[in-house]
Amino acid sequence: MDLPSLLAAIERGDDTTVFEFLEDAANDELTGDDGITLLAAAAHAGRHEVVDRLVVWDVDPTRPWAGGVDPVTWAAENGAYWVLNALLSPDRDPLRTDSPHRRALRVARAALESGAGAGSVPPPAHRAVITDLEAKLGVHRTPDELMARALVHADPEHDDWFASLFRIAEPESQERFDWARAVAEGAGDAGSLDRRRFALDAINFLGFGFNPDNGNDEPPFTLEAAEFLRPRLHTEQDPHALRTVVAAFTGYCTREELPAVLTHADHPDPGVRHRVTLAFPTLLTDHPDALAVLLRLAGDPAPVTRTSALHALTRHPVDTPVLRGVLTARLTDPHFDVRLEAAAALALRGDQRATPVLHEIRRGIKNRSSRGAGRLDDLHHQLRARTPGR
């Protein structure tokens, strides 16, 4: 194993290269000292997906790092939420008295009380760590307590925000929806923007957290949620809150109501435009202007929006000369995922102009961890399914 190259890839955040190297590594290379060195480097660099992959591939998350550092203690002390989750993932019994979960909770609480990491950018996620560990250990906080933790930094991209939302939405109940709606209504234009953002995010998360095994096909508050969100499609002025309204309305509304989100396809905020693309491909069959909107979004300045728009076109049989022209223009896009989705959409329509791009991408694949490998495999199965007699 080329340890220096792997460490360099971790340092520059090149997870794909790391995964490609690891895919071909022998098991005994990862279970020895080199595996521990890689695990520590990935944790310090905040590359939690690499940490997770190493743990899955049997690198011992309990073995001390250089200098006798305990991995779980280090992650909890530094508020490294996702890294800690990866390190704890093999432990299936958090409730035992000597579990690393209990140790991590004590350490995270002490670090928070001491102000560890104050002034760091971004701030450490001690509250997220505490929220997650408390839930796993049977300590359940009220929605107001969880919201208070999220609003300390009031950053929707921070782990404290996510962890609180996740725990609020975990019991997808009418009571939780009523709480979130009341907070959002009380934090209108004259109230707290942060509270409104959080409450709307909670309504959106409650739709994600719904468990069909409970006996229903949808949450019991689906109609109420759609009714609550519908007017906010037209009145919400904050970009983050509007992104959430679009996403949540898309999840709760009926098929016939989906076209309402098209009014935001040209919104100045790229996140709002991206959320609109996620309402497709259903919209292509339900609204006469939907295809034109989607083709416009396929040329959006934001690569993630272009990718989502093109991916929607791979999932729908609509086919026109104008559509193929848009797809062909994206074959030379500077972004890998955009080129791949454009080529996939053309290939699924039997257009040979996709072939050189797909061949080029395929030549760059080293193993199943290479970028685009999984997507090409999916495309291969889709094409086979469309071939008569296969």
Image (cartoon, rainbow, N blue to C red):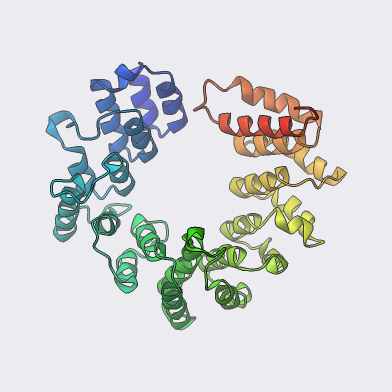
Residue 205 spot, x, y in % from top left = 47, 62
Figure quadrant of the C terminus? top right
Q: Residue furthest right?
A: 321
Identify which residue is drawn at 53% across, 73% down: 221
Quarter of the rendering containing residue 275: bottom right
Q: How many marks?
A: 0
Identify which residue is drawn at 39% across, 60% down: 166
Quarter of the rendering containing residue 13: top left
Image: 67 above or below 101: above
Q: Is residue 233 left or right of residue 15?
A: right
- Front position in the image: 278 or 196: 278
- Front position in the image: 9 or 52: 52
Figure quadrant of the N terminus? top left
Q: Is residue 112 left or right of residue 386?
A: left
Residue 22 spot, x, y in % from top left = 40, 23
Residue 370 spot, x, y in % from top left = 52, 27
- Front position in the image: 151 or 279: 279
Q: Is residue 122 left or right of residue 14?
A: left
Quarter of the rendering containing residue 56: top left
Residue 369 spot, x, y in % from top left = 49, 28
Identify which residue is drawn at 35% across, 37% down: 52
Image: 130 above or below 190: above
